[in-house]
Image (cartoon, rainbow, N blue to C red):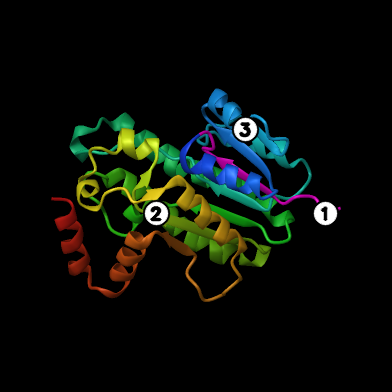
Amino acid sequence: MTPPRSILISGAARGIGRATAELFLARGWRVGMYDVDAPAVAAAAAGSERARHGALDVRDADQWEAVLRDFCGEQGLDVLVNNAGVLSSGPFAGKDPGTHRRTVDVNVAGVVNGALTGHPYLRRAPQGLLLNLCSASALYGQPTLATYGATKAAVKSLTEALDLEWRADGIRVRSLLPLFVDTEMVTRDGQGMAPLKRLGVRLTAEDVAAAAWRVVHEPRRPLRSPHRPVGRQTKALAALSSVTPDWANRLVVARLAR
């Protein structure tokens, strides 16, 4: 009997991470659910024999090593989802240095740690996939989301580089770029985002989970971009930014931020 395929998700206690875990569990996968909030992720994983859970602060590479060893053992890992992230919106100068630093540490260093420690496990799988949660804010710098957007631009660049670098290892690297998603991070921490008032929240965590499922199962197309915009708004913005001059993109972002 063929063993179930495996996926490990950071930030799996709630929001996109939890929705993704629930979708893959429902479709027969073995799922590793890890989060800095250990009690919450334990509650999210409760009742499933194919779910394994534990505490993970993505800023700590040693913790990454421990959870990967716990979940994978000597086996390979089919999919690793770098989902954990934090958001602090509002005027750049109104945030203290610690807030900016935490955003960078979680959203960039956390993704680097996941990719680095996950690489040997993904390489052992027949077709390993690293899936990074990016954001439409990576397309152009966003007022009131300056540091957050910068971290997502870093994730976008890392995705592009590793997709080329790890091709020889048989590992695909992809990113998902949603706009505003109806999660606690947006509703609680994103009220200072200027574009939110104009664009609204049109995506659910389940929409992004479904996009993750599609990416995992899509056919290989060597010349296709590694990035997958999620939702009509993001697809439109991504298409616009790819063909319009920089001054036009700047004008669009400036108007959205009013």
Which portion, as a residue range, is magenta? 1-13
Please state which amino acid type lies under the numbered disc 1.
Thr
Q: Which residue occupies the foreground of this view, 123 or 134?
A: 134
Mark 1 secondary-structure assignment: loop
Asked if residue 115 can be seen in this view, the reply is no
Residue tagged 2: 178
Q: Position of residue 230 (x, y in %)?
A: 42, 58
Return the x and y of residue 63 as percentages of the image width and height.
60, 32
Residue 215's place in the image compared with 120, above or below, is below
- Relative placement, left or right, of 182 versus 49 is left
Q: Which mark is residue 2?
A: 1
Q: Measured from the top left, where is residue 118 in percent x and y?
A: 63, 47
Q: Residue at x 79, y 44 (%)?
A: 74
Q: Earlier in the sequence, mark 3 or mark 2?
A: 3
Is residue 49 visible to the viewer in this orientation of the structure?
yes
Number of other residues with Cα within 10 Å of mark 3, as a class: few under 14, some 14 to 19, many 20 or more:
many
Q: Which residue is mark 3?
A: 45
